Every structure is written in C-alpha cells, then in structure tokens.
Amino acid sequence: MIKTIVCKDYDEMSKKAAQIVKELIINKEDSVLGLATGSSPVGMYKCLIEDYKAGVISFKNIKTINLDEYYPIDPTHNQSYRYFMNENLFDHVDICKSNTYVPDGLAKDVDKFCDEYEALYDKLGGADIQILGIGRNGHIGFNEPSNELIDKTHLTDLKEDTIKANARFFDSINDVPTKAITMGIGTIMKAKKIIVVANGENKADAVYNMLKGQVTGMCPASMLQKHQDATLICDELAYSKCK
Ligand code: GLP
C-alpha cells in the first residue's frame, strides 16, 4: 500500500518531503539519495538548501544517483538533468560533485553505459531514499506506460505526450530529445524508501491510477503499490480524483 500525505499546496508538500529527507540525512550522514528532476521536487530541494544554509544538515558524505537523463544531450545543455541538478541543488550545498551521479546523455555505447549505471547503483548499496515525480501518463523516471516494463537501467523512447509536456522547457518541440536513459522499474523498487511528490490538477488522473488503480505497466507508478515503504506527498488538486 502507498501511504498518502495530502497537503494544502505546493509549499506544504515541499516542506513535508524535505523533512523526511532531512531526517534521513541527520540519522545517516552518508546516505545515498536517489534523486529526480522536473518541477515537482524543486521546492523540496529549496527547503534542503535552506536546511544546509542553516547548518542543520550537511551533504559532505552524501552520495546521489539520479533517475534519468535525456539522450542524447550534452550535460552542459540548460535542459539536461545534470544541469538541472547542479542548478537546483548541488551548486548550493557542500556535496562533492564526484559523489553525484546522473546518467551520461552522451554515452557512446549506451547499452554498456546502462549496465554500468545499474552496477554502480548496486555498488553504492542502493538508494536509502528515492525521490520521484510522476508524469501525467503515470510514468516514473522515464518508464513510460507499457505492458512490458523494463526492470533495469535502459535507453527508452519517450511517448508523444511526454515530449509535449516537456516541450515547455525547450525553444521548440523539435528540440526535445526523443529518447532517454532511465533507471528501470526494478531499479526504482530496490530503494529502501520511496517518496513521490505530485502537485496540480494535471496529475490527478495519474495519482488516482497510482493509488487506486490496478497494478499495471500501463500506469508504471501503480507498481509502487508493491513497495514496502512508498509514500505519496501531494497537494489537494493532485488528490482531487481520489476523494
Ligand atoms: C519528466 C521526468 C520525470 C518527472 C516528470 C514530471 O518526464 N523524467 O522524472 O517526474 O517529468 O515532471 P514535473 O514534475 O515537471 O511535472
């Protein structure tokens, strides 16, 4: 079962999610954080930066491993997920950049890279916590709806809907990469604890299907119903169809 915390708005959602990460870091200063991009976790990262600046937490011994990255994309591109992580968290805290892992959007032998990323995940001991957003179609990471979800880190084609949803960040829809490297569903499920953050009415269907729908590859987030410690933290709008 997925535990659910419904918050009044984005700010409260961000604070609640950050609180859980903060407690983890306080209890285990060398935690491995599985991180996500997208607009949903930005507020949570802001709260964590504030906690760092207030001297409540340090990232000195933290390692991070990100869910996904567009492919191909240069890590210096302002829409790459590496760039996003630097801008929204890493550049503002005392983390050692060499302890932060994001899939390589320029990997030459991409299949080999994916195998190595999966092995790296295991070598780190797995994520103590995995942060997730959710796509409007229920995707997590870039695991798009499919009857044959892939377990391990892999290269995937993005669905039209996802390309359209993400086009807002690019100059034109033609600039949105059509592929991505993503942790697989099995990789995500290996995390000891999972937090999904979701806000806004456009996530209401996905949230409903994740919490109340059948466990099906057609809503990848519904797989989290099988995880032993998964929590959804969402705002009222995202929860509106579950009432
Ligand atoms: C992208 C990312 C996901 C993210 C989703 C939702 O496609 N690959 O990891 O959860 O979009 O993004 P947002 O939080 O901006 O709605």
Image: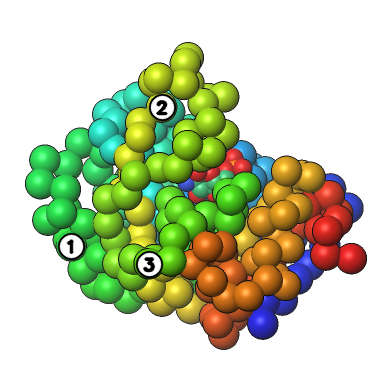
Q: In this image, 58 relative to 109: left or right?
A: right
Q: Earlier in the sequence, mark 1 or mark 3?
A: 1
The amino acid on which the numbered mark 3 sits, given as a three-letter code, is Glu
In this figure, which residue is indicated by the disc labeled 3?
148
* Closest to the observer, 85 or 109: 109
Q: Nearer the viewer, mark 1 or mark 2?
A: 2
- The residue that appears at 38% across and 49% down in the rendered structure is 68
Quadrant into which the N terminus falls: bottom right
Which marked residue is nearer to the observer: mark 1 or mark 3? 3
Give the secondary structure at mark 3: loop
Is the CB of mark 3 within 8 Å of ligand 1?
Answer: no
Q: What residue sits right under mark 2 in the picture?
A: 176
Distance in Å between CA atoms under marks 1 and 2? 25 Å
Q: Can you give x and y, in whole percent of width and height, for residue 22 in the image?
A: 62, 63
Amino acid on which the number 2 mark rests in the picture: Val
Quadrant where the C terminus sits is bottom right
User: In front here: 228 or 127?
Assistant: 228
Q: Earlier in the sequence, mark 3 or mark 2?
A: 3
